[in-house]
Image (cartoon, rainbow, N blue to C red):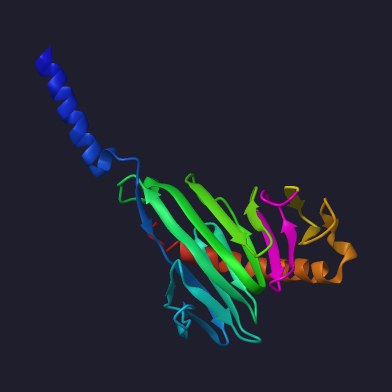
Amino acid sequence: MRFVSFSSALALCFCLSANGCSKGITRATAATVFFVKGNVIFGNAERNNFQPVTSKSKIHAGDTVRTSDGASLNLALMPGAFVQLSGNSEIKIEDLRLTKDGNETARGVLDRRASIRLNRGRIVSLFTHSDGSASDFGVATGQVTLRPDSDCLFSVWTDGATSRVTCGRGEVSAPDAQPPMKIVAGYFSQWPTPSKEPVSAITDAGAQLDVKAALDVEPELLDQAAGWQNRRVF
């Protein structure tokens, strides 16, 4: 019996040290450029080290992306999470990673994470559950953090002091807001604000423009995403 116990303990130690028995292997990923128009740059903002964005650029966590007037950029942050950055806007990529169980196939992906911070300007975000793996996607500004509750399409605008979130399809949450809030299609909320409930987009000119911009961008992102997902490895 002692021999059996020792053998079992030895096997357990070997298993824990091997990749195949671990909870998962996490690695950093990069955003993929779908489309770029005009002057768009990315790089390390602290070092003021920027370069032009091209169709071959790989944008990683820690990078800041800036668009000039009239420019735009379509990105795939991960399968199922796509954004368009409008002109005169800036985002920072805060997290891009996936966790795998060691398997080299797409089915081996356990978890994907992507989060960005909008420093100024506007982005349109499209989120869909692309496969069976868990996905954690977040968009933050200086006032609020957004997380999709379902497949959804939403716009986020900020000037640094004020943020407006408008939902075009589905539902998006602001779980850390006071009070926590869910915004459904056709409604918007703004921070800071005295309102404790989302407001109909019909009542606000800026929110109406947000909805129109989001609906105009959606087919473009869907078309580009379809071609990309047919080619991707993970």
**Quadrant in which the C terminus appears:** bottom left
**Vertical placement of residue 231 versus 66, above or below:** above
- Chief SS of the magenta region: strand
Magenta-drawn stretch contains 136: no
The answer to whether residue 172 is visible is no
Q: In this view of the protein, which residue sits in the foreground, 48 or 32?
A: 48
Residue drawn at x 66%, y 55% as measured from the top left: 152
Q: In this view of the protein, which residue sits in the foreground, 46 or 43?
A: 46
* Residue 6 at x, y percent in the picture: 13, 22
* Residue 63 at x, y percent in the picture: 47, 72
* Residue 191 at x, y percent in the picture: 76, 61
Q: Quadrant of residue 221?
A: bottom right
Residue drawn at x 76%, y 69% as measured from the top left: 210
Magenta-drawn stretch contains 157: yes
Q: Residue furthest right?
A: 203
Q: In this view of the protein, which residue sits in the foreground, 76 or 105?
A: 76
Residue drawn at x 61%, y 86% as measured from the top left: 68
**Vertical placement of residue 51 versus 76, above or below:** below
Q: Which residues are magenta?
A: 152-178
The answer to whether residue 181 is visible is yes
Q: In this view of the protein, which residue sits in the foreground, 233 or 97?
A: 97
* Residue 116 at x, y percent in the picture: 55, 64
**Vertical placement of residue 179 versus 141, above or below:** above
